[in-house]
Image: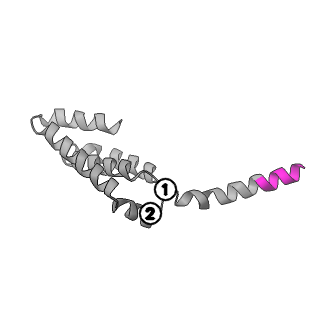
Amino acid sequence: MKTLYILVLGGALACSPVVLADAPFDAGKLGYMRGVLDTCSNVAPQQASTYLLQMKTFVGSASRETVSNAMRTDEYQQAYQSIRSRLRDEMSTMSRNQAAATCASYLTN
């Protein structure tokens, strides 16, 4: 009986990376994150690596094709344009330090 459990557990662990490799993810959230990254990288370049790390973590082991397909969806495009527009509007009257602080707050959301 123990042998059966070990075989089943071993099989599940061996197959899980393959199954999870192209698991679908939220294209809207990807668009949001990319919009924040693109906008805030100009305002607070010192935080760009933090944004990139967060995006890499979100994308995980998804293939380039999966990410590319998600970036072509309307959901991605709408989220990307929406957050870029909102950030530009918010930051248009702020000092550079205030804009950097705003970007930092978006990083945690």
Residue at 17% from the left image edge and 34% from the top image edge: 97
Marks 2 and 1, how far apart at CA:
8 Å
Residue 3: in magenta span: yes
Residue highlighted by disc 1: 24
In the rendered view, tell whether residue 58 sits above or below residue 67: above
Q: Quadrant of residue 87?
A: top left
Residue type for callout 1: Pro
Name the chief secondary structure element in magenta: helix
Residue 7: in magenta span: yes
In percent of width and height, residue 107 lies at 33, 39
Q: Say how the picture is coloured.
A: one colour
In percent of width and height, residue 88 lies at 16, 43
In the displayed structure, does residue 58 sit left or right of residue 50? right
Residue 71 visible in the picture? yes
Q: For the view shown, which residue lies furthest in the right direction?
A: 1
The secondary structure type at the circle numbered 2 is helix
The magenta segment is: 1-8
Residue at 75% from the left image edge and 52% from the top image edge: 9
**Foreground residue, 85 or 102?**
85
Residue highlighted by disc 2: 66
In the rendered view, tell whether residue 44 sits above or below residue 38: above
The secondary structure type at the circle numbered 1 is loop
Residue type for callout 2: Thr
Answer whether labels 2 and 1 touch (C-beta < 8 Å).
yes
In the displayed structure, does residue 44 sit left or right of residue 107? left
Q: For the view shown, which residue lies furthest in the bottom direction?
A: 65
In the displayed structure, does residue 30 sit left or right of residue 41? right
